[in-house]
Amino acid sequence: MNPVLGRVFPGLEGRSLRAAAVVTVLGGLVGVIGGESVVLALVLALAGSLATLSLRGRPNPLAEEYGLLPAIAALGALAALATPSLLVGLLAGVAGLGLLLWNAESARDTVRTAEPVEGLLIPGLGLAIALLTALSLPTASAAVGAAAFAVVVALALVVWALQGALTADPYAAKAL
């Protein structure tokens, strides 16, 4: 690696670079499809990802822990500026799942102890439920919005309870 790039992006490796590329592309798509200018969307998504890559590889534990904040802020700004639509919501949700995968990766990990995709089960299911609720329920009513929120929370609690039963030892799972 180039020594200058090594100082700016310490600990840069393939896994975090792939995660950064996914989040950058999805964030740029959120902005462009949401009606923002192409330059603003791409520059904001790229700046957040580059700042995160620069922070996450540092040996400081705070930088490793909170280094994802620039990417989160950039994606949040792009989502807030975008014109709401189902496609923008879907892209923003998938970009959020990409951020969770990026958060599971660490430059210091030489061996992956568990598959990080397993941690996306409950957030991905929540995203699917929210999108299906948005598609199936009528709009323009506060009561429908409150009902949709209640449905998502209730199903999330059921999935959380089932996930605890599935990951517990077999004897505890028999009690359910």
Image: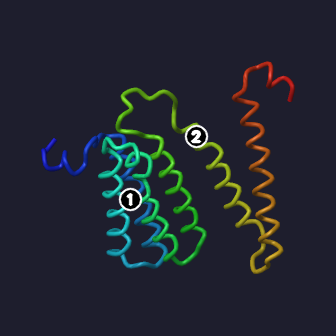
Above or below 9: residue 166: above
Q: Quadrant of residue 107?
A: top left
In this rendering, the answer to whether 124 lies above or below 164 is below
Residue 38 left/right relative to 140? left
Farthest residue toward the left? 3
Q: Residue at the location (40% across, 39% down)?
A: 106
Q: Of 165 and 34, which appears nearest the observer?
A: 165
Q: Amino acid at mark 1?
A: Thr
Q: Residue 120, image x and y in percent?
A: 58, 44
- Residue count near mark 1 (Cα–Cα under 10 Å), binned few <14, some 14–19, many ≥20: many
Q: Quadrant of the N terminus?
A: top left
Q: Is residue 30 above or below residue 69?
A: below
Camera-side mark, 1 or 2: 2
What residue is drawn where x is 86% and y is 29%? 176
Q: Position of residue 116 (x, y in %)?
A: 51, 37
Coloring scheme used: rainbow
Q: Left or right: 24 with respect to 137? A: left
Q: Residue at x 46, y 71 (%)?
A: 77
Q: CA distance from mark 1 to mark 2?
A: 21 Å
Q: Quick one: which residue is furthest to the top in this view? A: 171
Tell me the SS state at disc 2. helix
Residue 109, quarter of the rendered image: top left
Q: Amino acid at mark 2?
A: Gly
- Residue name at image x 33 percent, y 62 percent: 46
How far across and how far down the image is residue 129, in percent? 71, 56
Q: Which mark is residue 119?
A: 2
Residue that numbered label 1 is attached to: 24
